[in-house]
Amino acid sequence: MKPEFYSDEGCYITELYNTPADPVVSVARVRVMPGITTRWHSLAAITERYLIIEGNGIVETGDLLPHEVGPGDEVVILPGVPQRICNDGEESLVFLAVCTPRFEPEAYAENS
């Protein structure tokens, strides 16, 4: 496991599992501080799943209406779909980001 780092996206990320030896999946722990909304972004050719562990927030994906998420909720984001999440609570919003196939930086694109 790599140490947590701050991403330009506006959140803290810990890569829990991401190796070229297993290109099928990667798992990262994501932490969004209270009052923060991550940048709009998308992942080319990667399906991403948010598995909410702690805190509450509002997720936006593509053209869907924003909706609230909390512990136990899951969000599936298809390849190329713009996404962002807002922590509207008073504690950290923590979720696992499970990517299939595995996340690679070249797949990341900022959206406006």
Image (cartoon, rainbow, N blue to C red):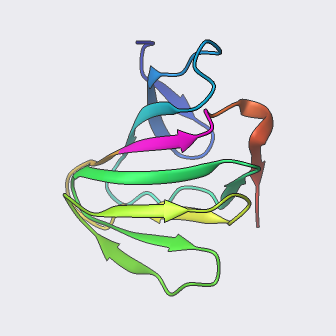
**Is the C terminus in the top left, top right, bottom left or bottom right quadrant?**
bottom right
User: Is residue 101 located in the magenta-colored stretch of the structure?
Assistant: yes
Q: Residue at x 45, y 43 (%)?
A: 97
- Identify the image quadrant of residue 96: top left
The percent position of residue 13, horizontal first and vertical second, equals 46, 32
The percent position of residue 26, horizontal first and vertical second, equals 51, 31
Viewer-proximal residue, 44 or 8? 44
Viewer-proximal residue, 60 or 32? 60
Q: Is residue 53 above or below residue 62?
A: above
Q: Residue at x 45, y 21 (%)?
A: 17
Question: Would residue 74 be found to the left or right of residue 70 on screen?
Answer: right
Question: Would residue 112 be found to the left or right of residue 69 on screen?
Answer: right
Q: Is residue 107 above or below residue 4?
A: below
Number of on-image labels: 0
Range covered by the magenta-colored residues: 96-102
- Identify the image quadrant of residue 100: top right
Q: Residue at x 21, y 56 (%)?
A: 55
The percent position of residue 23, horizontal first and vertical second, equals 63, 25
User: Is residue 40 located in the magenta-colored stretch of the structure?
Assistant: no
Examine the rendering and report whether any part of residue 86 can be seen: no
The percent position of residue 98, horizontal first and vertical second, equals 46, 42
**Is the N terminus in the top left, top right, bottom left or bottom right quadrant?**
top left
Q: Is residue 68 above or below residue 34?
A: below
Examine the rendering and report whether any part of residue 99 can be seen: yes
